[in-house]
Image (spheres, rainbow, N blue to C red):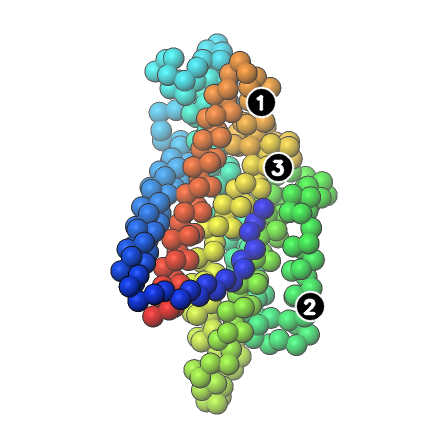
Amino acid sequence: MVPEPTPTTVESAVPPGDNGEVTSVKRRRRRRRDIGAALGACWLILIVAAAVFADLLPLPSPSEVTDAYSLRPFQTGAHILGTDELGRDELSRAIYGARVSLSVALGATLIALVSGTALGIAAGYFRGALDTTFDIGTSTVLAFPPLILLIALVAVMDPSTTTLTIGLGIVGAPTFVRIARANTIAFANREFVTAAKSLGAGHLRIIIREILPNVVLPVLSFATVVAAGLVVAEGSLSFLGLGIPPPAPSWGGMIAAGRESLYEAPYLVLVPGTFFFLTVFSLNRLGDWARGRIGKESSL
């Protein structure tokens, strides 16, 4: 569910006469990637702003039951995206659901990023038994299907925002451990690190001043991809009834509730599904753009 980074190296021999064509293709790809990232950023800014300031928007309460049962989208101006079988406004539930889904996923990403980066730097810098222990630990976590591991964690603890955030953070951390470890190993024996050691700098100073600045960009470039995977994970748990308990709305819970009337009212699945898809797609586009920019800068 959370993709594991795999370094790839592509080398190709290009005939001298094709240099212009190859450059043109690269420019088109870069332009498409930039456009996708810009559109993704616009959607994320819009949905995050709507979720944060939902209480200030002219929206009914997401749990408010009315007599406007199962209105279809655009059937009335009061409920532009329709209502569910209880008369609850779909737009309101989607926006308040974004608050739940994004807060859990982003909180889990922050936990995974901070803990995974710290453990990865420690493993890559000190090596030895510590590196072996962390390697076994991350391999063990990655060996389990993420959804099965999350179901086990939720089964042990009561479903809540805190439980889901911690559980998703544990699932996402091994990805950052491996990225941070690989980059730390690459920089640990560089000249500036050796010079710092020869000047008597301590381990903590070297890690903070020399290693961390070179590790943080590759780690951050993958954070949006991990966040996208965790949004999917949270939605999957809510779809299975193991996420945030109702009546609090979440995208996965809305999709699960709408499947019972999929043929009569498909919009009950399409509305939260569209919000879900656009958010995951936008996070992935931003991640691709960030990794492309960092790769371009590192090749200079």
170 sits left or right of 184 in the view? right
Mark pair 2, 3: CA separation: 30 Å
114 versus 237 height, above or below: below
N-terminal of the pair, mark 2 or mark 3, is: 2
N-terminal of the pair, mark 3 or mark 1, is: 3
Residue 74, given in percent of the width and then of the height, sits at 37, 16
183 versus 82 height, above or below: below
User: Count the marks: how many?
Assistant: 3
Disc on res. 237: 3
Disc on res. 133: 2
Closer mark to the observer between disc 2 and disc 1:
1
N-terminal of the pair, mark 2 or mark 1, is: 2
Element type where label 3 sits in the image: helix
Query: What residue appears at the point 65 percent right and 35 percent down from the top-left corner?
Result: 242
Question: For the residue marked with disc 3, what is the amino acid?
Answer: Leu
73 versus 99 height, above or below: above
Q: Tell me the crowding category of disc 2: few under 14, some 14 to 19, or many 20 or more residues within 10 angstroms, Cα based.
A: few
79 versus 7 height, above or below: above
Residue 76, given in percent of the width and then of the height, sits at 37, 13
Query: What residue appears at the point 30 percent right and 51 percent down from the top-left corner?
Result: 28
Element type where label 2 sits in the image: helix
Query: What residue appears at the point 69 percent right and 50 percent down from the top-left corner?
Result: 144
Q: Which residue is mark 1?
A: 259
Question: For the residue marked with disc 1, what is the amino acid?
Answer: Arg
Q: State which quadrant residue 6 falls in.
A: bottom right
